[in-house]
Image (spheres, rainbow, N blue to C red):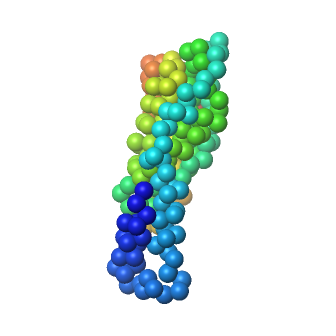
């Protein structure tokens, strides 16, 4: 990450909105924003799949669900946050992953500027690729500040996206079971 470019851009931005970047309260803002970018966009330098590599043998063929994984991301269209919860369900095919690893995978992809639809697909594809389960279903429910605080100004509006792969695609009963298990 190029901190100097970020600092320069923030200084120009502050000037562009009519602020004085040399005033006391703003003097360190370009540096603070560069440091913040390291944290909230840190997913670009990480491989989400690495969190799914350590698996455990399991004879269960029943659905594993981890629900209500909180996340924060940034919309690539307006560079405003969107946030909410991710729900992941998969049908193991001989191996399972530690539950914290699913949350870590979500975190890597969420820490990139993008859209919710893409985030949903990335998580599902990573689980399918690395765990090779019989199927996976991912659902994300999120509020977008680009809709809540600007434009239409409808705070509290939730956007839901989902991705189904493998046996979930062909089996609506499994989809319904997943929805029931996540409380929807």
Query: Residue 15: which quarter of the image?
Result: bottom left
Residue 9 at x, y percent in the picture: 37, 70
At x 56% / y 34%, what residue is drawn? 51
Q: Residue 121, can we see it?
A: yes
Q: Say which residue appears at 40% left-offset and 60% top-offset.
A: 2
Give the quarter of the image for residue 52.
Answer: top right
* Quadrant of image for the C terminus: top right
Q: Is residue 146 above or below residue 70?
A: below
Quadrant of the image occupied by residue 183:
top right
Count of numbered badges drawn on the protein: 0
Outermost residue on the top side: it is 59
Tell which of 156 and 71 is nearer to you.
Answer: 71
The answer to whether one can see residue 176 in this image is: no
**Residue depicted at x 53% and y 23%:** 131
Q: Is residue 26 left or right of residue 2?
A: right
Q: Please say if 64 is above or below 73.
A: above
Instruction: Tell me: residue 110, above or below residue 23.
Output: above
Could you say which is closer to the camera, residue 5 or residue 69? 5
The percent position of residue 61, horizontal first and vertical second, equals: 61, 14
Q: Which quarter of the rendered picture does the N terminus lie within?
A: bottom left
Of residues 30 and 169, the one nearer the viewer is 30
Q: Residue at x 60, y 34 (%)?
A: 101
- Residue 155 horizontal/vertical position (percent): 51, 62
Residue 26 image point, x, y percent: 50, 81
């Amino acid at each position: 990450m190029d901190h100097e470019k970020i600092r320069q851009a923030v200084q120009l931005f502050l000037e562009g909105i009519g602020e004085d970047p040399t005033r006391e309260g703003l003097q360190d803002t370009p540096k603070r924003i560069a440091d913040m970018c390291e944290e909230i966009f840190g997913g670009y330098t990480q491989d989400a799949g690495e969190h799914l590599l350590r698996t455990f043998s399991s004879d269960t063929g029943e659905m594993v669900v981890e629900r209500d994984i909180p996340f924060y991301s940034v919309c690539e269209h307006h560079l405003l946050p969107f946030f909410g919860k991710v729900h992941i369900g998969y049908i193991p095919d001989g191996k399972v992953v530690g539950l914290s690893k699913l949350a870590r995978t979500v975190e890597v992809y969420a820490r990139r500027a993008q859209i919710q639809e893409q985030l949903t697909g990335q998580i599902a594809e990573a689980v399918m690729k690395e765990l090779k389960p019989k199927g996976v279903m991912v659902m994300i429910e999120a509020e977008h500040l680009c809709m809540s605080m600007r434009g239409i100004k409808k705070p509290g509006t939730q956007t839901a996206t989902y991705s189904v792969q493998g046996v979930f695609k062909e089996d609506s009963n499994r989809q319904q079971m997943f929805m029931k298990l996540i409380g929807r």
